Amino acid sequence: MTVEVRNLTGFDIDKIILGKIARKILKSEKKAGYAVSVVFVNKREIKTLNKIYRTKNCPTDILSFGLDIGPRIYVTERYLGELVICPEKIKENSFRFKNTFRNELKLIFIHGLLHLLGYDHEKGVRKALAMQTKQDRYYAAFLQ
């Protein structure tokens, strides 16, 4: 299992905890050995991506790009996809929700991984509840 992290921002990102979270979740979800890439970008970049892929003209905290989005050139079957995360939005959310930056990042990372694994909170109440339950359980395991 590989988590490739590219940080295109000035934020200090704990790559080790992201790897631990990914390993635990992927093992639990029977996807051990799969790779995930994560890129950290600024608000301007994530706003552009959000507008292109979700037709929402605003920055967001995370975008998940599974294998069903974009060309499949050079993608192996052991690759789940890419998460694009905006640490500026994570920081804003941490203040808003009275959370630490570190814990808010864990929560958003878990949320994105679950999307890559096929969970979708926008596909009805039952699916939203299933995703929320998994997210809460994994988050509690890594809460500090």
Image (cartoon, rainbow, N blue to C red):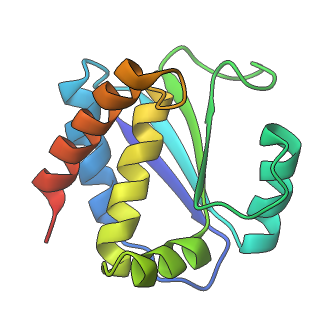
Residue 44 locus on image (x, y percent) = 81, 71
Q: Is residue 65 left or right of residue 143?
A: right
Q: Quadrant for the C terminus, please.
A: bottom left
Residue 110 lies, with reference to residue 85, above or below; the image says above
Q: How many marks?
A: 0
Q: Quadrant for the N terminus, please.
A: top left
Examine the image and state in which quarter residue 29 appears: top left
Examine the image and state in which quarter residue 34 appears: top left
The residue positioned 47% from the left and 43% from the top of the image is 112
Examine the image and state in which quarter residue 77 appears: top right
* In-front residue for pair 40/50: 50
Residue 83 lies, with reference to residue 125, above or below; the image says below
Residue 57 lies, with reference to residue 75, above or below; the image says below
Q: Is residue 87 left or right of residue 13?
A: right
Looking at this view, name the residue that lies furthest to the front: 125
Residue 18 locus on image (x, y percent) = 34, 57
The residue positioned 81% from the left and 22% from the top of the image is 71
Residue 78 locus on image (x, y percent) = 47, 20
* In-front residue for pair 75/59: 59
The residue positioned 13% from the left and 54% from the top of the image is 140
Residue 50 locus on image (x, y percent) = 77, 50
